[in-house]
Image (cartoon, rainbow, N blue to C red):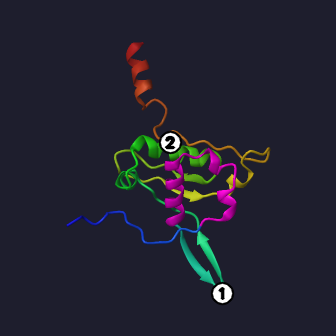
Amino acid sequence: MGRKPKFQLRRDVYIEWEISESKAIRRLSAIGIRVLWRFLQKRKWTKMRRRIVYENCDLVFTYAEAEEMGISNTAFYDSVKRLIEVGFIDLDHQGGCYGQDYSRYSLSERWRNYGTENFQKVEKRRSLQHGLDVRSHMRKSIT
């Protein structure tokens, strides 16, 4: 008997045709595309008359969930960082370390301008405050 996946989502993924032909999607690795699909799968939606309206904010995707999907921590971090850089997602809240707080993301439309002069460049912020990372600690102990 196999165990039931802990983070299984039974939702369809809707991907706009513009995404599949965008310059931004070409900058993603295969794992990056899987991570993007998962973010798209996590969206909640409501039907308003004959139109579907997606809620693109407050999306949580943890390292534990990525590991369950067979994605290493390093590959997941790199994928999220790249998704932010090319404009598919934005970091709304930086989570803390040791699983006490989760990062929350929102889907962004910045990817539409990727490769043009109108593109707003955003980079993933550091997860640790300056001075609390290993390199800062090493610099302090040397001096």
Residue at (80% x, 44% y) in the render: 117
Q: Percent x, y for residue 120?
A: 71, 46
Say which of 136 and 45 sits in front: 45
Q: Name the residue that disc number 2 marks.
A: 78
Examine the image and state in which quarter residue 18 appears.
bottom right
Tag 1: amino acid: Arg
First reached walking from the N terminus: tag 1 or tag 2: 1
**Residue at point 35%, 50% (across, down):** 99
Identified at 66% across, 58% down, the residue is: 19
Q: Is residue 41 shown in magenta?
A: yes
* Magenta stretch: dominant secondary structure: helix
Cα gap from disc 1 to disc 2, whole angstroms:
39 Å
What's drawn in magenta, residue-wise? 15-42
Check residue 36 for magenta coloring: yes
The outermost residue toward the top is 143
Q: Is residue 3 above or below residue 89?
A: below
